[in-house]
Image: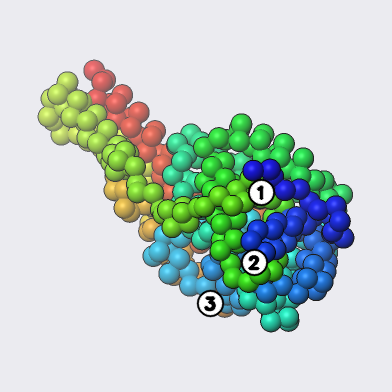
């Protein structure tokens, strides 16, 4: 099957017309932070008056986009209980990064999607959300990565979130060029091939299939320009969207990895007792070799978040035990105490989006600082645990 190209006889440079069985699909490739994309989406829908408008959103992202007051209802204790701290931090950082770029270009991130939703309602067209649920995409992507790749991806993402790099409208225009996008996707696949399939290829297939299954004879589909080349190769190719939405089960090694540190500690202590004998002095030295680094590491990590003194003390005291149980991280102790001592107000929650735009804001806002405390105390405790394992090994091997 030949791959369709943008139709030269159409008045919009970023629109591809797909036709089959008397149905027409106008595929609009957009940049998510571009006023020109907003105008083009509005013009296409206004001119075509389609039966259906499809947008590159899932139900979760759609609800978030339309609910401007969602931050007022944030409950920090619920976030901690549901173990969504890292997901929320990443979402806030990404949102802040996109909004910062959007402010420089005078357009709200995702403005073209909002424009499509608004125009669909204005003309009575049926609105269809055609993207895969964000949680399925993230979990399927994460499951493909090994430990080292996860660290690399996390570092790269965090670095991009807080980047102050300037982007102009010309830069975004270049991103709309399909040849450039193809080269960028190819380069991305070479760097992290494990990520390309769940993050890009699967979504291309899912999006195209959902659009083809949408009702109506005339459809306008608004998607990011980066998806268009891949989607065109999948036009007319059936997709099992239910299978593509399945969350992969945990790796059999995941359970083992959770207990690796406790098992290694027990093994090192047993080896020490075997070599030096079961004496109070031997046990005391090895216990201290474990406890002190974990306590100090967690305390330093918690203090790095400028936490309350009681939070720092609690983190240090609990660290020797929390580092031994995979279900109870140090942050599960420090973060609730920090939230209790410096309870975030409704006003703090309302400022979350603005404060998440800078590192200073993360420390200034009590809600965000609880998330920082959770992260830095876990990191400090983990570093202390590895230092402690070395200390126990040396204590057990000493004469």
Q: Measured along the vertical axis of the image, is residue 396 above or below residue 53? A: above
Q: Nearer the viewer, residue 289 or 76?
A: 76
N-terminal of the pair, mark 1 or mark 3, is: 3
Mark 1 and mark 3: Cα distance apart in space? 41 Å
Q: Which residue is mark 1?
A: 232
Mark 2 or mark 1, whichever is nearer to me: 1
Q: Measured along the vertical axis of the image, is residue 115 above or below residue 274? A: below
Which element type, helix, strand or loop, lies under badge 1? helix
- Say few, some or many: other residues with alpha carbon within 10 Å of mark 2 (under 14 / 14 to 19 / 20 or more): many
Q: Which residue is mark 2?
A: 54
Please tell me in which quadrant of the rendered image residue 70 appears.
Answer: bottom right
List x then y, in percent, for residue 180.
77, 40
N-terminal of the pair, mark 2 or mark 3, is: 2
Which element type, helix, strand or loop, lies under badge 3? helix
Whether residue 226 is visible here, answered yes or no, is no
The quadrant of the rendering that contains the N terminus is: top right
Q: Is residue 154 left or right of residue 282?
A: right
**Residue depicted at 59% across the width and 61% down the height:** 212
Mark 2 and mark 3: Cα distance apart in space? 29 Å
Q: Which residue is mark 3?
A: 73
């Amino acid at each position: 099957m030949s791959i369709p190209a943008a139709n030269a006889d159409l008045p919009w440079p970023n629109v591809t017309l797909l036709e089959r069985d008397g149905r027409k699909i106008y595929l609009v490739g957009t940049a998510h932070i571009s006023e020109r994309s907003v105008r083009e989406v509005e013009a296409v829908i206004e001119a075509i008056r389609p039966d259906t408008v499809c947008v590159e959103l899932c139900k979760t992202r759609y609800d978030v986009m339309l609910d401007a007051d969602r931050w007022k209802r944030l409950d920090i204790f619920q976030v901690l209980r549901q173990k969504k701290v890292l997901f929320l931090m990443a979402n806030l950082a990404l949102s802040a990064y996109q909004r910062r770029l959007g402010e420089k270009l005078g357009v709200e991130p995702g403005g073209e999607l909002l424009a499509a939703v608004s125009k669909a309602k204005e003309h009575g067209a049926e609105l269809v959300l055609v993207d895969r649920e964000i949680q399925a995409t993230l979990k399927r992507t994460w499951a493909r990565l090994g430990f080292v790749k996860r660290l690399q991806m996390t570092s790269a993402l965090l670095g991009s979130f807080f980047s102050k790099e300037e982007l102009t409208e010309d830069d975004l225009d270049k991103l709309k060029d399909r040849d450039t996008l193809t080269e960028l996707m190819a380069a991305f696949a070479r760097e992290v091939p494990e990520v390309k399939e769940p993050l890009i290829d699967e979504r291309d297939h899912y999006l195209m299939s959902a659009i083809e299954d949408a009702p109506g004879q005339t459809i306008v589909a608004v998607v990011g320009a980066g998806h268009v080349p891949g989607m065109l190769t999948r036009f007319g190719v059936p997709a099992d969207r239910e299978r593509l939405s399945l969350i992969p089960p945990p790796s059999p090694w995941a359970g083992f990895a959770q207990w690796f540190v406790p098992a290694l500690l027990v093994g090192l202590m047993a080896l020490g007792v075997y070599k030096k004998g079961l004496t109070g002095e031997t046990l005391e030295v090895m216990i201290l070799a474990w406890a002190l680094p974990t306590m100090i590491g967690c305390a330093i990590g918690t203090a790095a978040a400028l936490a309350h003194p009681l939070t720092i003390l609690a983190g240090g005291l609990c660290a020797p035990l929390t580092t031994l149980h995979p279900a109870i991280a140090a942050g599960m102790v420090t973060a609730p105490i920090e939230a209790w001592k410096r309870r975030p107000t409704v006003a703090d929650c309302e400022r979350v989006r603005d404060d998440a735009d800078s590192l200073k804001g993360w420390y200034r806002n009590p809600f965000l600082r609880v998330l920082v405390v959770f992260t830095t105390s876990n990191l400090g405790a983990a570093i202390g645990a590895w230092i402690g394992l070395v200390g126990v090994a040396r204590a057990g091997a000493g004469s």
